[in-house]
Image (cartoon, rainbow, N blue to C red):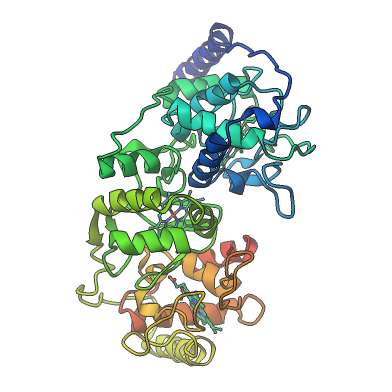
């Protein structure tokens, strides 16, 4: 009975998909002669540059060592890599033949000029609220970049996920359609919210996704995983042991560092690197909105929380041997840069060799050790082209056992929380993963 019902359900779904494909194949928009760069108003182009920085377009549209906006960067999803397209005005391999209308439609509806569905790895589900005039400014900016000939690989998705037409079904389920809006410029929170939800697409990393990769509205900005990193919650109770202020978050988002919270690393370093070039007031409005969603440190992160009862399967002797090892390694490998809180103030990442006192690091209060593993294995490099003190990666210097001992010592003795149970697995995953910024 069950199997019959199940195959019926599948047959129905299949029929629905076929119907949808026939019922809704979006129209192809006409190809144009690539417009001359001089035909665009320089003020519009300049505004477009700011908006592209807010939207972090470059990160996904430039491969390592590749030309700006020429594409080829692999956006890693749990089902495979999807490559950012070539969005330079090259007529053959880029968007040179796209009209302004085709470009605006792509941001609002996730369609290419020919009317093919794009994958939501392109955050059009967020860009769909960007007002037309902003999308037009970004178009002017992109169409005045240097055209670069670069063929981008097809998405590496297994069949049938690679069938673009099936995205029609995904959109039906999870995409509410374009709702471009311009918030009241005098209402700062509304402006910040619009930027966070729209162009800034913070939820693309900080909101958890369901099995079909759609962001879960119920868990808006509640923290998620992507590309080997844990993206901490931004709303409600957060992992940071000290409450965020809007000023500090603005500094973090524009400079990649906040005194009381430390560094923006990994994928967040990319975001901050681009926001550094966006209008500071826009970023400040985003920070004010994000901070307004926060209620402060979570119970486990709060410094007032009583140190947790620490229970492990280990015998007392095993545990104390591990902690002694962890403490010794911490003293020799970490302490010279990360003095304990209360001593010397930590400088900025760019200004001094001092790291953050580790007891202030969000990474130590997170429910899992993913980001600590990333930091220890791969270190921290200052943003490309900028000076600053790096943290060396310890991947080839310390064994997994040694790193686990440091992590257990930092959790249990430095911040009084139970060691992460799954840390060995976390570490193995992070070893296989890519480097921190
Ligand atoms: C998180 C990564 C990411 C960000 C950020 C991003 N894109 Fe993309 N974009 C992609 C991916 C991946 C694709 C290809 C999707 C596909 O193949 O279906 C894409 C496709 C596109 C396309 C379609 C091009 C074509 O030839 O079909 C346009 C236009 C585009 N992006 C513009 C932008 C703009 C403008 C911004 C910034 C406001 C931006 N993207 C930010 C990942 C991103
Ligand atoms: C590409 C993925 C990605 C995007 C997009 C992204 N973040 Fe993050 N974010 C991360 C990761 C990963 C971390 C953890 C990095 C670290 O600890 O250095 C992080 C950390 C943060 C933190 C520090 C949290 C804490 O308590 O320590 C803040 C604040 C933050 N992000 C804000 C934002 C805002 C605002 C946006 C949108 C403008 C945004 N992020 C977009 C990946 C992302
Ligand atoms: C040569 C100096 C140096 C050494 C040695 C060093 N670090 Fe760092 N570390 C830094 C700098 C600089 C940063 C980036 C600025 C910051 O966040 O403090 C950093 C960042 C971090 C962070 C992120 C803090 C945050 O911002 O949330 C963690 C966690 C960390 N280090 C752990 C360690 C551990 C564990 C060790 C020893 C195994 C270690 N570091 C050794 C310099 C160092």
Image quarter where the C terminus lies is: bottom right
Image quarter where the N terminus lies is: top left
Q: Nearer the viewer, residue 211 or 96?
A: 96
The residue at the point 63 percent across, 75 percent down is: 395
Residue 128 x/y as whole percent = 45, 29
Q: Name the quadrant containing residue 191.
A: top left
Q: Viewed as shown, does residue 239 lie left or right of 202?
A: left
Q: Nearer the viewer, residue 101 or 374?
A: 101
Residue 151 x/y as whole percent = 78, 36
Q: Nearer the viewer, residue 254 or 422?
A: 254
Residue 332 x/y as whole percent = 52, 92
Q: Answer whether residue 385 is visible to the viewer in this image.
A: yes
Q: Nearer the viewer, residue 250 or 167?
A: 250
Residue 401 x/y as whole percent = 55, 79
The residue at the point 43 percent across, 26 percent down is: 175
Q: Answer whether residue 159 is visible to the viewer in this image.
A: no
Q: Viewed as shown, does residue 216 lie left or right of 184?
A: right
As drawn, 359 above or below 255: below
As drawn, 390 above or below 85: below
As drawn, 232 above or below 59: below
Q: Name the quadrant containing residue 435.
A: bottom right
As drawn, 291 above or below 252: above
Count of labels shown? 0
């Amino acid at each position: 009975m069950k199997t019959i019902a199940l195959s019926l359900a599948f047959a129905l779904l299949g029929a629905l998909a076929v119907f949808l494909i026939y019922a809704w194949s979006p129209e192809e928009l006409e190809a144009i002669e690539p417009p001359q760069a001089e035909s665009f108003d320089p003020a519009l182009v300049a505004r477009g540059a700011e908006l592209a920085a807010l939207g972090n377009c470059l990160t996904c549209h430039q491969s390592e060592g590749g030309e700006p906006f020429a594409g080829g960067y692999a956006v890693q999803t749990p089902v495979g890599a999807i490559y950012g397209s070539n969005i330079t005005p090259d007529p053959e391999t880029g968007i040179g033949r796209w009209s302004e209308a085709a470009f605006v439609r792509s941001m609002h509806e996730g369609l290419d000029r020919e009317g093919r569905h794009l994958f939501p790895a392109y955050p059009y589900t967020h860009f769909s609220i960007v007002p037309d005039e902003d999308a037009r400014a970004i178009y002017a900016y992109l169409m005045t970049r240097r055209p670069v000939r670069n063929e981008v690989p097809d998405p590496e998705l297994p069949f049938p996920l690679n069938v673009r037409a099936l995205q029609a079904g995904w959109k039906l389920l999870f995409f509410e359609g374009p709702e471009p809006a311009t918030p009241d410029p005098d209402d700062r929170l509304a402006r910040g919210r619009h930027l966070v939800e729209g162009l800034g697409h913070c939820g693309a990393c900080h909101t958890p996704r369901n099995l079909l990769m759609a962001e879960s509205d119920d868990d808006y900005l509640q923290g998620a995983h992507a590309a080997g990193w844990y993206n901490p919650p931004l709303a409600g109770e957060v992992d940071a042991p000290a409450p965020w202020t809007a000023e500090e978050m603005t500094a973090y988002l524009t400079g990649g560092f906040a005194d009381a919270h430390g560094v923006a690393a990994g994928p967040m370093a990319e975001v901050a690197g681009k926001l550094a070039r966006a209008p500071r007031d826009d970023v400040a409005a985003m920070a004010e909105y994000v901070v307004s969603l926060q209620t402060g440190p979570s119970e486990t992160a709060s410094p007032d929380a009583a140190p947790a009862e620490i229970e492990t399967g280990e015998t007392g002797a095993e545990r104390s041997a591990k902690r002694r090892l962890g403490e010794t390694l911490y003293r020799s490998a970490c302490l010279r840069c990360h003095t304990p809180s209360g001593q010397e103030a930590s400088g900025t990442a760019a200004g001094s060799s001092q790291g953050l006192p580790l007891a202030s690091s969000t990474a130590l209060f997170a429910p899992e050790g993913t980001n600590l593993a990333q930091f220890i294995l791969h270190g921290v490099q200052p943003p490309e082209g900028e000076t600053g003190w790096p943290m060396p990666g310890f991947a080839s210097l310390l064994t997994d056992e040694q790193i686990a001992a440091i992590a257990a010592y930092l959790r249990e003795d430095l911040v009084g929380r139970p060691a992460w149970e799954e840390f060995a697995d976390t570490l193995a995953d992070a070893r296989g993963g890519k480097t921190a910024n």
